Image: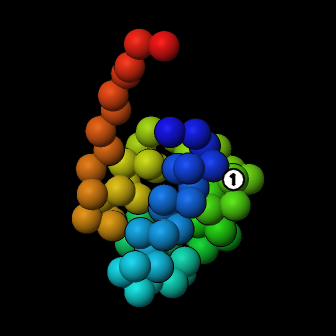
Amino acid sequence: MTKTDLTKTIRALRKMQGLTQAQLAQRVGLERTSITNIELGKQTITEPVLNAIAKALGYRVKVRFEKL
């Protein structure tokens, strides 16, 4: 998954649940502008933040490596 795919996925999951950026930010403990910047690909997502966003949306992060 590319960075763009990840940010699009976060935005899509948030919207599917009817959450605003402010509501997701509150659940995660971030500022709304951080969620905006994450969704726009302007802010790096650390592992703890990614896990917190996933949890707030009712998901968990699963990483899979495939041979090139």
Of residues 14 and 25, the one nearer the viewer is 14
Residue 30: in sight, yes or no? no
Q: Residue at x 47, y 79 (%)?
A: 15
Q: Is residue 59 above or below residue 24?
A: above
Residue 8 % position (x, y): 56, 60
Q: Secondary structure at mark 1?
A: loop
Residue 67: in sight, yes or no? yes
Colour theme = rainbow
- Reading the image, the residue beneath label 1 is 41
Residue 27 % position (x, y): 38, 72
Q: Residue furthest top?
A: 67
Q: Residue furthest right?
A: 42
Q: Quarter-wise, where is residue 67 in the image?
A: top left
Which amino acid type is marked by label 1? Answer: Gly
Q: Is residue 19 above or below residue 12?
A: below
- Relative placement, left or right, of 28 versus 6 is left
Q: Residue at x 27, y 50 (%)?
A: 60
Q: Residue at x 59, y 66 (%)?
A: 35
Residue 19 % position (x, y): 44, 83
Q: Is residue 2 above or below residue 58?
A: above
Q: Callout 1: 10 Å neighbours few (<14), some, many (20+)?
A: some
